[in-house]
Amino acid sequence: MKKALIAVLAVSLLSLSLWAAGPKTYQVTGPILEIKGDVIVVQKGNDKWEVAKDAATKITGELKVGAKVTIEYTMTAKAIEVKGEVTKAAPKTETKATAKSSGGIKG
């Protein structure tokens, strides 16, 4: 009985942590090209990535130009604009084969 209770609690905690996990986490690694206010510019291949940071961002080590960093980030929407209304699908038209089987079209 005690083992069953422990197993149920463990499964409950695991499923709760997975449910509260939030959006997928990504990462970018490369040298810092520039630090401007709350934005860090990182070189990844031929691309320059601008990543914002805030007071909650955990920083380990000293951020300085030239240092190689790995930044973990999530994608968060700042604004969402819906461009149109959802349209209903056009009604299905009866085909000749379907109509023959139901007696609708005589041929």
Image: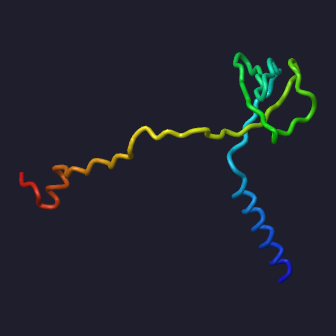
Residue at screen point 18% across, 52% down: 97
Rendered position, 66 above or below 5 = above
Quadrant location of the N terminus in the rendered image: bottom right
Q: Would residue 85 be found to the left or right of residue 38 on screen?
A: left
Looking at this rendering, what residue extends furthest in the right direction?
61
Across and down, in percent, residue 48 comes to 71, 20
Q: Would residue 103 be found to the left or right of residue 74 on screen?
A: left
Across and down, in percent, residue 96 comes to 16, 50
Residue at screen point 57% across, 39% down: 79
In front: 66, or 39? 39
Q: Would residue 99 be found to the left or right of residue 44 on screen?
A: left
Across and down, in percent, residue 56 comes to 81, 42
The number of discs equals 0
**Residue 70, picture quadrant:** top right
Rendered position, 54 above or below 37 = below
Across and down, in percent, residue 24 comes to 69, 44
In front: 18, or 105? 18
Residue at screen point 69% across, 50% down: 22
Rendered position, 94 above or below 50 = below
Looking at this rendering, what residue extends furthest in the bottom direction?
1
Instruction: Give the image's coloring scheme.
Output: rainbow
Looking at this rendering, what residue extends furthest in the top direction?
46
